[in-house]
Each structure stands twice: as C-alpha cells, then as structure tokens.
Image: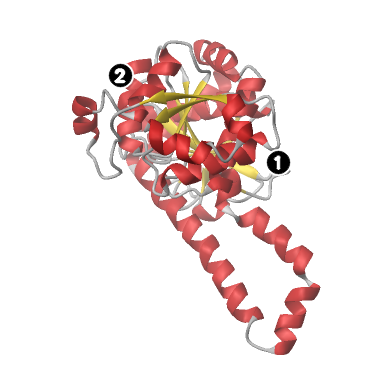
Amino acid sequence: MGGDRGVEAVIGGINHSLSRNNRLKFLIHGNQSQLYKKIKYFPKISSASSIIPCDSVVAMDEKPSTALRSGKNSSMWSSLNSLARGNAHIALSCGNTGALMAMSMMQLRKAPGVNRPAIAILWPSTNQRGFNIVLDAGADVKADSDDLLQYALMGAAYAKTGFSIKIPRIGLLNVGTDIHKGRNELHAASLLIADAQKTSESFEFVGYVEGGDLPSSKVDVIVTDGFTGNVALKTGEGTASLIKHFLKESFNKSLMSKLGSILSLSSLKELNKKIDPRNVNGGIFLGLNGVVIKSHGGADEIGVAAAINLAFQLEDTGFSQKLMTQFAKN
C-alpha cells in the first residue's frame, strides 16, 4: 500500500508475474476495498491470492521510530508478520525503506553474529549474468571496518547461495585503487577482508574498486557504506533515464534520424532492456532471520514484477536455508 504508485502498480506487477509463472501464490496486505476493486479485473490474481485486511499505511516520509510506534495495524507490519509466523516465504514491499528495515529487525531479528543488516541490490553490468551485487544500498548510512567486513561476507554468501557463483570476486568501493587512497575505515576493512579470504577461501578479494567499476565485469560483489551505495544507486538510475532522454531526442531531430531509429529498433530495445533499472528492481535485506525484498518506491508494474521474480528465484533454490547455513560458516 505504501509505494509511490499505490495499489495499481502492485496489482499490475502481480498480474504480470502470474502471466509468466503460475507457481506463484500471494498474500496481499492492505485496504480490502481498494484491493478488491483492482483484483476483480484479473481472474488469475483472484485464484492465486488471499487478501489480508489492514487498516493503515506507513507513509513514505514517516520516521522509522514513528512507524514502529503507530504502524502495528499497517500493511507493512502485517506482511512481515506473515513471514515471521511462517505463513509466507518472502516479504516484499514498495514502501518506506527505513520503516521496513526497522519493522523487519523487530519481527525477524538479526541473524546470529550480524551487527548491521544491509540492502543488497543488483546493478546492471557487463558480467555474463548481466548484473553485479552492490551492498549496502541504504540500510544504514554508517559503516565501520567491521561492518564492511560483514557486508563482504554477506555479499559473498548471497552470490554463492542465490546465484551459484562458486568463488565470488569482492571489491571494496573507494575513491581510487591506490593503497593510500580513501578513509581509515576503508584501509582497515581491506585488511580484514583480505585476512578473511585467506581463512575461508570461499571468495576472492580483488581490493579497491572505483565508481566506474560498478557496471564492470572485474567483480561480482561491491561493498560500500549505505550512504555511498544509495547515492550511487540513485545516480545510476538518473543516468539511465538521461541516456533514454538523449536517445529519444536525437532520433526525433530529423526525418533521417527517425528512419535510423526504425532500422535500429531491435538494437534499441535490447539496449533499453539492459540499462532499464526496472529489470533488476529489488533489494534484499541481508542479515535477518527471514528474507525481505525492498522494491523501489517508484516502481511500476514492470519493476514490481521484477522484484517478485527475484523473490521466486531465491525461494525456488532454497535460498533462505542455504543463506542461514552460509552465515553460520562465516
């Protein structure tokens, strides 16, 4: 209920997902009358879902502390409660990120040994699978060297269990690759991650990487603090939109350019697919006793469907159980 585009985007995303995958089942939490008005037009949703009535909604600008105090009747709290009780396998929300993290930690608790949970997102890249894993993308703006080590271990576990990457390559985001660049926390974290690699041999630490490496094929996982990660995420989304705007503008300049756009239509569609953030929508909360996926607040039905697809892929491979086992090893 709490996303920027409201019920319509979520119901549209569910319908889009069901048209491709009839194994999905949904518990839809929210205002009953609003949901019924939309769902009645989609027979597939009616047969594959149940509505859990909720009286209130967590606003996008609501403080997490306020949401915790007054949001016990909200759709967000209710969806997480379904996960905590074992009635759902994964919880997914387009709502307020801070409130979602706070409620998730209260209901699911942090996994053993985890200090700060992190949001791991999929970033379009030139890797064979089409994306890199980046964390933290905004769960906590602060991160010391021990936190960054934990993010590296969680990112490696996510890559191994979620995407079958045998030896994930981990990079630490910095302002340069030289050993003397960056803050003291980064220097300390690089030493800790390098030592952890020697001990576990379950991942490869490639050292410092720069912003330009986010979409590169030299790494599988990029580790940073939540402030930097979130700024990078929003910058990437804005750049993708800018490229689309400039391409559209260029192809509309003249008759010849319009003809050129028609001739290159299939290539343009492929480019759009690769740089469209909606196709890799969905950040997973790592470090909790349960799997929560945060969809972008402004996601449309394509973006919501992508987050649903990610949730299904993870659960279909037994991700929850494998991740807990991997955390225990670390």
Question: Percent x, y for residue 168?
Answer: 63, 31
Q: Is residue 220 visible?
A: no
**Element under disc 2:** helix
Answer with the quarter of the image where residue 226 lies. top left
Classify mark 1: residues with Cα within 10 Å, few (<14), some (14-19) or many (20+): few
Question: What residue sits 19% from the left and 26% below the top?
Answer: 69
Question: Percent x, y for residue 49?
Answer: 55, 25
**Element under disc 1:** loop
Q: Nearer the viewer, residue 27 or 62?
A: 27
Residue 4 numbered tag? none
Amino acid of disc 1? Arg
Question: Percent x, y for residue 175?
Answer: 43, 52
Disc 2 to disc 1, C-alpha distance: 34 Å
Q: Nearer the viewer, residue 262 or 9?
A: 9
Q: Quickly name the residue at label 1.
A: 129
- Circle nearer the N terminus (2, 1): 2
**Can you say whether 141 is above or below 178 in the image?**
above
Question: What residue sits 22% from the left and 38% below the top?
Answer: 63
Question: Percent x, y for residue 230?
Answer: 40, 47
Question: What residue sits 37% from the left and 25% below the top?
Answer: 53
